[in-house]
Amino acid sequence: MTRGEERMTKVVALGIDVGSTTVKIVGVDTEGNLAWHFLEQADPRVEDQIERFLVRALSIPPGPPSSPNYGRGRGAARSAGEKERVGLPLVATGYGRKLVRQSTRSVTEITCHARGVYRELGHGGTLVDIGGQDSKVIGISPKGDVVDFSMNDKCAAGTGRFLENTARRLGVPLEYMGQVALSASDEVSISSTCTVFAESEIVSLIAHGVAVEPILRGLHRSLTQRVVAMIRTVGLTPPLMLSGGVVQNQAIARMLEEEMGERVIVPRHPQLMGAYGAALIALDLR
Ligand code: ADP
């Protein structure tokens, strides 16, 4: 048995986060530790993708059996009209959670991100989740309950999409965007708050010979200021915590710290926090 397989045998509950940009699945062990995960860009044929994810997850040798009245075991026959459950408790979250017909329960991203981050960091505060096409600010109590939230899913300007479009346009790999932005000694202000107009503005700046670095720094500033405006709407209860794929961009945490004058805490796997929270809820269902 390889080391990877050894870890996988511990999985007793699963959480799947079907996001607008990526799909993530997390398996937890009996103690709720993150024991296995898998991530892919969202496929337009999302139901097929979910099926593939579950096949992959269930090829994990199972851990101790879940409660006898739950689930039907791997490869169990499915009857018409009945949910196609998998052999482990499975909670679905994310934008496409209703498409996971195999799930035991579907739960909002707000609840799942709060649950995952609270377990990972061990305290409440204000959580900002910045995903591919939406961003959320979630107030978490010292006991881990969601006490307030605000969500932006109408405008791409405070989301990963805002950076992704420009990364492509400027030929800078997404993973280096933050690094390049932080390397700039000056900053160009991007006045357009709409993604489409910002993109045209950037094309025009490039055409006028402005270097990529200050443009990227300005672009990150614009995104962070959007996020700060959302945080101010909900109100900040420190500490400030971040989750979501965009947080892997190191400039986001750094600039948010600058803008808010607050230390920012990032969990080990920010992009997996929704799926992790879902898996922890699934663990409660055993
Ligand atoms: P969703 O849950 O909405 O599908 P995610 O939380 O998975 O979104 O975040 C996806 C976003 O994360 C993408 O828009 C992309 O911009 C950003 N992202 C992913 N990986 C990185 C990385 N290594 N560096 C910077 N940004 C990243």
Image (spheres, helix red, strand yellow):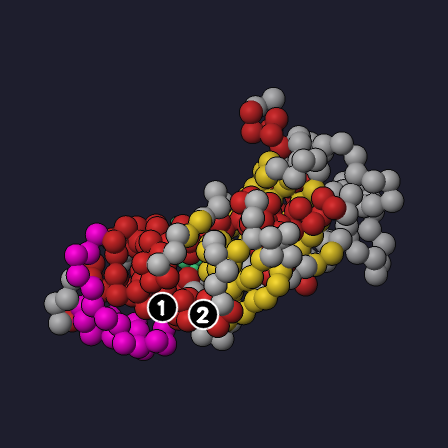
Q: Residue most toward the top?
A: 1
Q: Secondary structure at mark 2?
A: helix
Q: Is residue 70 magenta?
A: no
Location of mark 1 (residue):
225
Residue stretch in magenta: 183-206
**Residue type, mark 1 in image:** Gln
Specify the label residue 178 is tagged with.
Answer: none
Residue lying at the far right of the rendered structure? 69
Q: Position of residue 103 (x, y in %)?
A: 72, 54
Quarter of the image with the C terminus is top right
Disc 1 packing (10 Å; few <14; some 14–19; many ≥20): some
> Residue at 13% of width from left, 72% of height from top?
208
Which SS class for mark 1?
helix
On whether residue 203 falls in the magenta region, the answer is: yes
Q: Is residue 32 above or below residue 98?
A: above
Task: Estimate the spatial distance between the alpha carbons at disc 1 and disc 2, rounded to whole Å.
Answer: 10 Å
Q: Amino acid at mark 2?
A: Arg
User: Along the line of sight, which residue is nearer the eye, 123 or 117?
Assistant: 123
Residue 52 in view, yes or no: no
Q: Residue 174: horizontal and vertical position, in percent?
A: 34, 54
Say which residue appears at 53% left-offset and 45% top-offset.
121
Residue 51, percent across and down? 65, 51
Residue 18 higher or lower than 86, as above or below: below
Query: In the rendered view, does 235 fall on the left or right side of 67?
Result: left
Asked which quadrant contains residue 222, the reply is bottom left
Location of mark 2 (residue):
232
